[in-house]
């Protein structure tokens, strides 16, 4: 028979054992994410609610994520790597940071152009949302036909009109790398020099700042990702409505190679210790609920084809669709070093 003095000790030991068992059974996922959109919080919360898997998140920009993964090596805790630039996805793939996976569900839902096949061992990364690099212009000062291609932005007719963010920002660097693939080195460098000559002011700020610059009259034309424009289009704020009344948008190069489209995508980390949870999260990102959340929450186009969207800004912006450029992320990654050198030579800050 147990003594009364022994029972409290036994109960304490039992509680410790139960706590240890619960900790061992807790499902987790370590996500290294370059997405910095507040609306994504609900996206992650919905996954945890549906699966019981808790997400531990490390947030940084694309370059910071890649640098951390390289530094951590085989000891990295990352399970899923989520990046917001095709070139960086391509670079991570080239550097062997992804673990190829096989998922019939993902391969059936995500178009082949938006995932990277690694041969018989599987796919290294999948794109889950896209955004176009569009041109906005002051419709009282600029004709649409003068800015309906990326090349036109570097022509003398747009002298003193152009505003952009830093040329070295991933959004611009990927666009310039795509243009380099189309035009070749000499013509691309001449074009970049033309962009610098046409600047209304030195590059600064983010994409929303470029849109506001056009509306204020500081600029006549600017580059922006489509989701920044869609945010303003959906806003009820009087100041945002005033901005939209002064500008218009064009999807460049509809008569040639198509508008440059970048993407957000993810892959399983090479040294993931939670492979099953990582694949489950990736498959969740391709689900109708998550795909619609990309559209509703951050005004991005879903990667999965055929979903009915309920985003009036995306529908108004693109109408019945647009011709999109088709270029492998590896090409963008491979062109970036020489394009950055061009930017340095022509003085594009």
Image: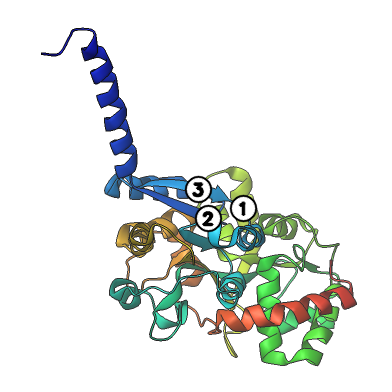
Report, in whole angstroms, how far the alpha carbon at label 2 lies from the one at label 3.
Answer: 6 Å
Q: Position of residue 177 (x, y in %)?
A: 69, 80
Could you tell me which secondary element the residue under label 3 belongs to?
strand
Compare residues 27 and 48 and report the one nearer the observer.
27
Report, in whole angstroms, how far the alpha carbon at label 2 lies from the one at label 1.
Answer: 8 Å
Residues under numbered marks 2 and 3 in contact, where contact means CB atoms less than 8 Å apart: yes
Compare marks 2 and 1 and give the one earlier in the sequence. Answer: 2
Residue 174 seen in the current view: yes
Farthest-out residue, left: 1
Where is residue 229, by image quadrant?
bottom right
Residues under numbered marks 3 and 1 in contact, where contact means CB atoms less than 8 Å apart: no
Report, in whole angstroms, how far the alpha carbon at label 3 lies from the one at label 1.
Answer: 10 Å
| Vertical side of 8 occupied by 156: above or below | below
Could you tell me which secondary element the residue under label 1 belongs to?
loop
| Vertical side of 107 occupied by 199: above or below | above
Mark 1 neighbour density, 10 Å: few (under 14) some (14–19) many (20 or more): some
Compare residues 188 and 247 and report the one nearer the observer.
188
Residues under numbered marks 2 and 1 in contact, where contact means CB atoms less than 8 Å apart: yes
Q: Quadrant of the C terminus?
A: bottom right
Compare marks 2 and 3 and give the one earlier in the sequence. Answer: 2
Q: Disc 1 marks which residue?
A: 60
Q: Disc 3 marks which residue?
A: 57
Give the image's coloring scheme.
rainbow
| Vertical side of 3 occupied by 260: above or below | below
Farthest-out residue, top: 4
Q: Which mark is residue 32?
A: 2
Could you tell me which secondary element the residue under label 2 belongs to?
strand
Where is residue 171, by image quadrant?
bottom right
């Amino acid at each position: 028979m147990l003594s009364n003095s022994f029972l409290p000790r036994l109960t304490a030991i039992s509680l410790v054992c139960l706590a240890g068992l619960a900790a061992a059974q807790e499902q987790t996922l370590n996500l290294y994410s370059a997405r910095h959109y507040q609306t994504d919080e609900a996206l992650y919360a919905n996954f945890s609610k549906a699966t019981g898997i808790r997400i531990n998140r490390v947030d940084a920009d694309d370059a910071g994520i890649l640098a951390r993964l390289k530094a951590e090596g085989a000891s990295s805790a990352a399970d899923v790597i989520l990046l917001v630039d095709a070139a960086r996805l391509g670079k991570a793939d080239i550097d062997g940071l992804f673990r190829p996976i096989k998922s019939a569900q993902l391969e059936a839902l995500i178009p082949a152009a938006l995932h990277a096949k690694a041969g018989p061992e599987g796919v290294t990364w999948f794109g889950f949302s896209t955004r176009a690099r569009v041109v906005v212009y002051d419709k009282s000062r600029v004709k649409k036909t003068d800015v309906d291609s990326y090349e036109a932005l570097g022509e003398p007719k747009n002298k003193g009109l152009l505003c952009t963010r830093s040329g070295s920002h991933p959004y611009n660097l990927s666009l310039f790398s795509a243009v380099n693939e189309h035009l070749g080195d000499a013509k691309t460098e001449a074009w970049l020099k033309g962009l610098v000559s046409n600047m209304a002011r030195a590059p600064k700020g983010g994409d929303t700042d470029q849109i506001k610059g056009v509306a204020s009259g500081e600029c006549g034309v600017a580059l922006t990702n489509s989701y920044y424009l869609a945010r303003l289009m959906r806003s009820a704020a009087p100041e945002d409505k005033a901005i939209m009344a002064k500008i218009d948008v064009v999807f460049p190069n509809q008569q040639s190679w198509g508008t440059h489209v970048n993407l957000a995508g993810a892959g399983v980390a090479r040294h993931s210790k939670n492979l099953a949870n990582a694949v489950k999260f990736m498959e969740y990102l391709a689900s109708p609920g998550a795909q619609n959340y990309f559209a509703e929450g951050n005004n991005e186009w879903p990667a999965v084809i055929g979903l009915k969207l309920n985003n009036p800004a995306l529908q108004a912006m693109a109408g019945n669709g647009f011709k999109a450029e088709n270029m492998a992320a590896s090409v963008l990654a491979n062109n970036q070093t020489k394009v950055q050198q061009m930017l340095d030579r022509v003085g594009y800050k």
